[in-house]
Amino acid sequence: MKSNTSTSFQRLLPPLVACGILTFLSTVLRIVLATAFPSPNPVSGFELLHAFGIGLLFDSGTSLVLTTPMAMWATLRNRARPAGASVRRIGAVTTTLAWSAITFLFVAEGFFFEEFQSRYNPVAVDYLIYPHEVFVNVWQSYPLVWVILACVGVGVFAAWLTFRALPAEQAPGRKPVLALAWLAAAVLAAFLLQPSFARFSRDRVVNELAGNTFVSLAQAVFTRNLDYEAYYPTLPAGEAMERARKLVFQPGHRPAGPTNTLFRRVPGDPERPKLNLILLLEESLGSEFWGSLGRPGESLMPRMDALATNEALLFDNLYADGNRTIRGYEGVYCSFPPLPGDSVVARDRTDGFETLAQVLDRDGYETTFIYAGRGVFDGTGNFARKNGWKRFLELKDFKDPAFTTVWGVCNEDLYDRAIVEMREAHRAGRPFFITTMSVSNHKPYTYPAGRIPQDPLEKRRDNVVRYTDHALGSFFEKARKEAFWSNTVFAVVADHGARVYGSQTIPIRSYEIPMVVLGPAVVPRPQRVSKLGSQLDVAPTLLGLLGRPYLSTFFGHDLIHDPESGHRVLLHHNRSVGIYADERLVVFNLNRHIEYFAGNPKSGQMHRVPEADARMKELETDATALFQVGDLLYMDRRYRDNGADH
């Protein structure tokens, strides 16, 4: 009879065999990648050996973590005899499918590495968003049937090995000590094997070889940090920083931090009264709806057109930096370049990020973010609370709203609550910065009945834009009757255009947005501001109107007080980024592919040009520096107030 120790150990044979198979497949993949797709740079044998050693640690540790459920089942199961035939058949089929899927994941990573010389990253995750296009492309590009059959073959063999390891008989009772030991080892492996350990070499491809399929995929899913330097043009780090500082520093700015940051002191009058500021960020309210911004025929924004032309600063040459609300947050609030990959608002290194709210909080302002929807959407609540806004109000904080959709409360509810908050702050004698984010101008395009002549049941975008105009007009009618009207700056700006259209890689024409600034304290007479600008310029421009000195690390310019020259637009679309100025657009695509376009986006689509002129080359270098430095500051957490000179 076998000893209890031997029988107990046999319980762990299936998860141990599974660990071995996973580690073996990972090692085979690493050998294939190193052989078939070597680094374009000379790599020493020691570096390759180092990569394989680190890879083996990652593979074995990851395998230990992934097989933990199997180990828990094996050690905590209380069975004195083998499972019935039906249970074993179900287990065999399930195990075969699991091993086939895991094998396919390894094979697919090989094809991905062939194209991008990278382990799984956010690009791979993005492919899952477009399953039809991706599947057709894979079907046409690779022998998919044979690949699947091969993966199933490996899956059958791996399942057979796993089941061969099952003990023929098992002593009754559970073995919690074995379960706890395995669990402790898995937790230790997960804690010790950080992805950064695989970044030991200056050669990116070698570092990718050292990585692990499952770790890379998990990091892509949960961080959304695209390795910028791996896919886009770069300069030497010092040169990029020096050029970026020259591009963002303006006359009168005084350096206020280390030379590897953009911190500078922006001049102003410290004795100037602290004017209040309210920033109304509008969902999908592109320039195409405004008669004052060139819409042919009937304007959908007549009330705001009247305010913009008769008593406001109207910025008529402004562009969004992306085509999602979360990109609007990044540009308007953070004055930060729209990096490829996810917006920094959705990434994992944005706590304490420099924002307009951070600047005003340091100057003694009360800061409040009022969101018409649920704070969990796009991580809005988490972003606001951790980046300068002391109070965050969302859908659940609106009592008895007049009208709601699936997205949240209507614009009138939002603006009425904003007036209440401003009134209370004014009565308490506190300067305030209040931000609102609307949701009405969004499918299903419904709004309260009776506000405008059009029927909300038609569910048309044009109608909800008219309602947005009605709600904004009503807000300003009410606000001008309040005591805070005379010492408050009001700004209306869109988060992005209404829709994306155009054939070019970055359809800049659809990115045009309005910004309207009102308030007798800063706008004594109406004026059009036609300097080229983007959402990155919103925060510096509003702070310039407030007129007080402040510490800045923003990438944007003050569109009123900064010199005429040097203004630009930084843009993002999918995994492409670009720069626009002087009727020229330079686009960076994955794998350092660069495109050049020329023309006036206001009058039509820009056209592709085969060769870059001198100005395009200059813009290309500027964009390289700005995007590269943005990525460096984000990844190193240097886009925040870390001991800068106050």
Image (cartoon, helix red, strand yellow):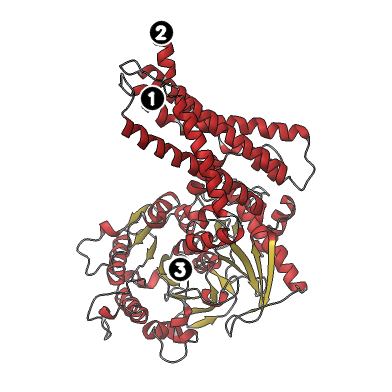
Left or right: residue 35 compared with residue 360: right
* Residue at the farthest front position: 85
Q: Which mark is residue 498?
A: none
Between label 2 and label 3, give the one nearer the viewer. 2
Lateral position of residue 453 relative to residue 581, left or right? left
- Farthest left residue in view: 400
The quadrant of the rendering that contains the N terminus is: top left
Q: Earlier in the sequence, mark 1 or mark 2?
A: 2
Q: Residue at x 53, y 44 (%)?
A: 151
Residue 350 coordinates in the image, percent (x, y): 50, 49
Could you classify mark 1 by the number of other residues whose Cα lies within 10 Å: few (under 14), some (14-19), or many (20 or more)? Answer: many
Image location of residue 529, percent across then percent down: 55, 79
Q: Which residue is mark 2?
A: 3
Residue indicated by mark 1: 74
Amino acid type of the residue that numbered disc 2 sits on in the rendered structure: Ser
Cα distance in 3D space between marks 2 and 3: 70 Å
Would you identify the image quadrant in which residue 310 lies? bottom left
**Mark 1 or mark 3, which is nearer the start of the sequence?**
1
Q: Amino acid at mark 3?
A: Asp
Marks 3 and 1: which is nearer the front?
1
